[in-house]
Image (cartoon, rainbow, N blue to C red):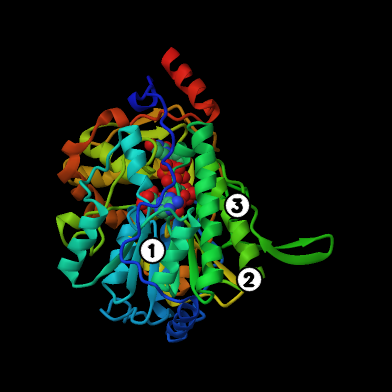
Amino acid sequence: MHLKSPWLTRPSPSPPRRSIAGITAPRAVRRASAKKSASKAFSARAASVSSGVSLSSFTAPSKAAAKAQARALRTAVFAADKPDRSGADAKDAGKGQKVMVIGGDGYCGWATALHLSNRGYEVAIVDNMCRRTFDDQLGFNSLTPIKGIHERVRKWEEVSGNKIELFVGDICDYEFLSAAFEAFEPTSAVHFGEQRSAPYSMMDRTRAVFTQTNNVMGSINLMYAIKEYAPECHLIKLGTMGEYGTPNIDIEEGYITIEHNGRTDTLPYPKQGNSFYHLSKCHDSANMLMCTKTWKLRTTDLNQGVVYGVATEETMMDPALINRLDYDAVFGTALNRFCIQAAVGHPMTVYGKGGQTRGFLDIRDTVRCIQIACDNPADPGEMRVYNQFTEQFSVNELAALITEAGKKIGLDPKVITVPNPRTELEEHYYNAKNSKLQDLGLEPHLMSDALLDSLLNIIVEYKDNVDQRLILPGVNWTESASVSKTVAKVAAK
Ligand code: NAD
Ligand code: USQ
């Protein structure tokens, strides 16, 4: 198999420069009044948490029947005893809450900003557009034709009547971030604004350093901004399931109780990220726990699984609101990539043995999980950790599901085994808990249903946009070196 991808042979550009692209709609607000009104809006929130039900285990991926049984049991249990979130889709569900969506121009952030805005949360987007810069640098593009952020926000106001404030700038620039905080006075800050691709972070030294600097520094700045300008603001931070790695024991939701030499303690679950990206999230979590305890912040760390899908209610309201969908080997994630590959007749690229198992969720559930987190703020000094995924599958199981769904719409999906460019276990135990968000009222979309209604049918519409040269992997974990060495190696092949 020839793995040379065209975009890697080009000299690697430097990551985006840090600069303030400008703040739109700034307001001069005194710090004291920011604190006062933030805490007022905060205390007005409904406290609708119920005790819910905890599932003590999740089924092993290889046992399909046991898995279906567990799913049925879970559905039945939650149907019988879950908090009343019947008002969650009302136009004024979020009245009184001001949510700053950092990374609001990205895949998860855009869908979340519109979802909350449509339900009466006052929303501001903060983004420095670096994700669009990565595409420009590497020659990638979203499958779906996305509009610029200013046009997106204007169109949203026209379609919904709801205004979204826009702050264009880099959260690693503290002056910019604090001005945005003073101006908007958020009651919640949802932090999606990081470099989120594992392959990108493993491309070369420059991008490894950029990823960890951007992600870790941005999060530290954000916690300082909360401490200094809005101490009651609830930080909802996107972590990742990959922080846990693939241990040979069950994965708990954030914390594990350990008995050692006759003593017992509840400690953060061990973290073993396997890319500079995943490790940036581990460092974030450790920093967040320290700041939460020391400064009595209210924080929630959402360890999200791999997100799939493109359609949410709001992003489909107008073509100018459509969300991005990545299929290249650096930013495209497994299920989205496989669906796009199946749609254009490219074999689905299973890396190695395909037994790699991960947690997955539909983007329609991502936006609901964030809404649930906003509605259930942590107490001061408490860092909640939720595992944000709804089902777990191996890569082989994904390919099988897509084959079945593709055939229903006349596609003929095929699978190819590609030498694994990553260093990861290809066969392993995986049993991750994920009951906390469902205890708070999340009703999951299941992948088998979602494949057709929110993904394959939409992809088929845009399949002419696919550049098949971007599909094969070009980032190898063991070849990660300085930019010049990587380029020289690839060119010599
Ligand atoms: P994305 O790249 O589409 O969006 C991230 C956004 O953040 C981009 O618009 C980018 O321009 C912005 N951003 C990055 N650094 C910034 C900075 N310093 N200042 C301001 N803006 C900045 O990524 P996504 O897929 O939407 O993921 C969002 C978050 O969710 C990430 O933190 C990611 O790690 C996490 N996550 C994503 C997935 C997934 O499958 N997509 C799964 C688990 C966790
Ligand atoms: N994989 C294939 N073939 C492909 C692409 C991926 O077999 O064509 C395999 C990978 O080797 C890996 C698994 O699929 O074992 C998942 O890979 P991915 O690219 O879908 O996801 P990952 O790199 O882990 O990162 C994505 C998001 C990241 C998020 C993470 C959630 O890019 O932001 O944090 O999913 S998690 O995996 O739970 O950590």
| Residue positioned 43% across, 53% down in the render | 170
Read off the residue under disc 1. 101
Q: Amino acid at mark 3?
A: His
Give me the C-alpha separation between circle 2 and circle 3. Answer: 18 Å
Vertical arrangement, residue 245 with respect to residue 487, above or below: below
Three-letter amino acid code of the residue under disc 1: Val
- Position of residue 127 in the picture relative to residue 299 (left or right): left
- The percent position of residue 168, horizontal first and vertical second, equals 35, 56
Earlier along the polypeptide chain: callout 2 or callout 3? 3
Quadrant of image for the C terminus: top left
The quadrant the N terminus occupies is top left
Ligand 1 under 8 Å from disc 1 Cβ:
no
- Label 1 CA crowd tier, 10 Å (few <14, some 14–19, many 20+): many
Q: Which residue is mark 2?
A: 295
> Helix, strand, or loop for circle 1?
strand
Q: Is residue 411 above or below residue 96?
A: above
Distance in Å between CA atoms under marks 1 and 3: 21 Å
| Quadrant of the image occupied by residue 345 | top left
Q: Are marks 2 and 3 in contact (CB under 8 Å)?
A: no
